[in-house]
């Protein structure tokens, strides 16, 4: 294994060696560190040797054996193997290998009691102000240009943490005002339309940052011209909250970075209700926009919207009580 402080390399010697190495190379080519997954795949590689796996074939028997629950293991740890095996199998199929893909929803996690933090309109204005007045350090001269646009897109388009980090120049269609989100969570691609104001903001940003950039360049680069690390971007978020006077409860207590996405969804539903949109018809559009695998995740936002805005609670309960679930469950 390498002594590198960032990328860690592992040896793969099993019958799926070529596919594993190609898969990791693809992920790292996208700018991901992918250390924990690489280590997990190294364990899987040793497992394939022990069970006499066929060369270049990911069988159902091998997959089910690898993901089976182990003694004293929590469900979340088991689920990491399930997710990894699904993603790896999809990769193998794309490159012509024979592979068994676990069915969607194979592993059910227990309902979560977590309630997302939804930023108010006033809090968003304060965050925007702090982003627009970001203090530029000499080591990161473009931060004052990058950070305001990045966070406005997050609040206005509801992208995931990883999606905004890895967005490339070629993914931003300024002519049509559309973002292309490629190979994201749940192995789904999607198109995300932007409002006219956000498109204009991106046009102005691109003139400053990407007049001569290549298509594969990171759209929101750090000082080195590469993607922000997860830690660096989270630190920026925490600093914005602090400067905006929004208290943070500590790790795991929020507001979390992902709560920006939750805020987008809830505010979208609030606006639809206030403008008398048919929520039953509109909800699938929100689901597709956010890249959800089904309507359940989007429906949970209806409960949040009803609970947070008493003024429209009666409208939601009267018209859409049948599609508003309890607050429990995961938000993606």
Image (cartoon, rainbow, N blue to C red):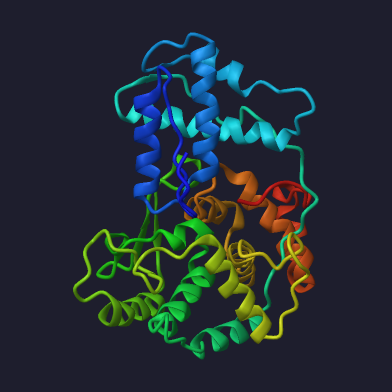
Residue 12 in the image: state x and y as whole percent: 43, 27
Q: From the viewer's perspective, is 165 left or right of 56?
A: right
Residue located farthest toward the left when viewing the structure as drawn = 212
Residue 134 in the image: state x and y as whole percent: 51, 87
Q: Residue at x 33, y 21 (%)?
A: 97
Q: Residue at x 55, y 30 (%)?
A: 104
Q: Could you say which is closer to the camera, residue 252 or residue 327?
A: 252
Q: Is residue 77 above or below residue 157?
A: above
Q: How many marks?
A: 0
Residue 27 in the image: state x and y as whole percent: 40, 44
Residue 294 in the image: state x and y as whole percent: 57, 42
Q: Is residue 217 visible?
A: yes
The image quarter in which residue 306 lies: bottom right
Q: From the viewer's perspective, is 81 left or right of 90?
A: right
Q: Could you say which is closer to the camera, residue 71 or residue 206?
A: 71
Q: Is residue 102 visible?
A: no
Q: From the viewer's perspective, is 203 left or right of 3?
A: left
């Amino acid at each position: 294994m390498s002594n590198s402080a960032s990328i860690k390399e592992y040896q793969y010697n099993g019958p799926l060696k070529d596919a594993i190495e190609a898969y990791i190379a693809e992920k790292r080519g996208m700018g991901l560190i992918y250390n924990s997954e690489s280590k997990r795949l190294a364990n899987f590689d040793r497992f394939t040797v022990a069970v006499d796996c066929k060369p270049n074939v990911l069988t159902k028997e091998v997959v089910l054996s690898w993901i089976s629950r182990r003694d004293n293991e929590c469900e979340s740890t088991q689920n990491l193997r399930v997710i990894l095996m699904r993603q790896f199998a999809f990769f193998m199929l794309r490159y012509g290998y024979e592979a068994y893909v676990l069915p969607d929803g194979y592993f059910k996690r227990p309902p979560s009691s977590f309630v997302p933090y939804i930023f108010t309109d006033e809090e968003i204005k304060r965050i925007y102000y702090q982003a627009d007045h970001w203090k530029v350090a000499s080591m990161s001269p473009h931060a004052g240009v990058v950070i305001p646009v990045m966070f406005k897109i997050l609040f206005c388009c509801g992208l995931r943490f990883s999606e905004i980090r890895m967005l490339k120049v070629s993914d931003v269609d300024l002519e049509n005002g559309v973002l292309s989100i490629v190979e994201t969570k749940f192995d789904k691609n999607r198109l995300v339309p932007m409002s006219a104001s956000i498109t204009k903001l991106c046009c102005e940003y691109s003139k400053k940052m990407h007049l001569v950039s290549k298509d594969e360049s990171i759209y929101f680069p750090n000082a080195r011209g590469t993607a922000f690390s997860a830690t660096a971007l989270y630190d920026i978020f925490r600093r914005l909250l602090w400067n905006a006077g929004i208290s943070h409860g500590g790790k795991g207590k929020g507001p979390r970075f992902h709560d920006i996405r939750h805020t987008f969804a809830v505010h979208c539903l609030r606006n639809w209700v206030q403008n008398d949109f048919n929520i039953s018809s509109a909800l699938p559009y929100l689901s597709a926009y956010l890249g959800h695998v089904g309507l359940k995740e989007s429906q949970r936002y209806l409960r949040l919207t009803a609970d947070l805005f008493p003024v429209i609670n009666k409208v939601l309960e009267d018209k859409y009580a049948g599609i508003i679930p309890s607050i429990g469950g995961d938000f993606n």
